[in-house]
């Protein structure tokens, strides 16, 4: 009887340990996935900011070049 009870206790403990391990692994997987999604969102935001800055700089440079060419052409036509 003692041996059977001991085996039963071992089996229960083993099943409980497996269950805890599975929950732990699932929790770690979820945490890793959340971190990955957060890093992706941050990276996307940074890329969007860089693209916006490049767009603004391109527009400013285009306006400056067009203005310079316009005044130079006006100077050549009138001068």
Image (spheres, grey):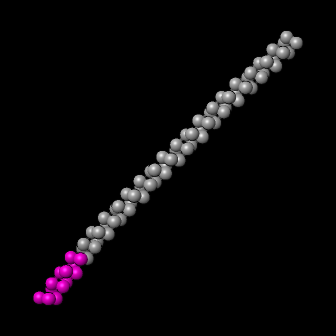
Image vertical order of residue 59 relative to residue 7, above or below: above
Q: Position of residue 44 (x, y in %)?
A: 52, 44
Magenta span covers which residues? 1-13
Q: Quadrant of residue 77?
A: top right
Residue 4: horizontal and vertical position, in percent? Answer: 15, 85
- In the rendered view, would you say 71 is above or below 33? above
Which residue corresponds to the image point at 79% horizontal and 18% vertical from the top-left?
71
Left/right of residue 43 with respect to residue 68 in the rendered view: left
Displayed quadrant of residue 49: top right
Judge left or right: residue 16 versus residue 28: left
Residue 3 horizontal/vertical position (percent): 16, 88
Q: Left or right: 41 with respect to 56? A: left
Q: Residue at x 59, y 38 (%)?
A: 51
Q: Is 7 drawn above or below residue 74 in the view shown?
A: below
Count of marks placed on residues = 0
What residue is rendered at 62% in x and 33% in y? 55
């Amino acid at each position: 009887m003692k041996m059977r009870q001991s085996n039963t206790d071992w089996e229960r403990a083993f099943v409980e340990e497996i269950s805890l391990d599975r929950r732990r692994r699932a929790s770690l997987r979820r945490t890793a996935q959340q971190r990955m999604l957060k890093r992706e969102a941050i990276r996307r935001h940074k890329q969007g900011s860089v693209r916006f800055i490049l767009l603004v700089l391109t527009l400013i440079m285009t306006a400056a070049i067009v203005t310079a060419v316009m005044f130079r052409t006006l100077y050549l036509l009138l001068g």
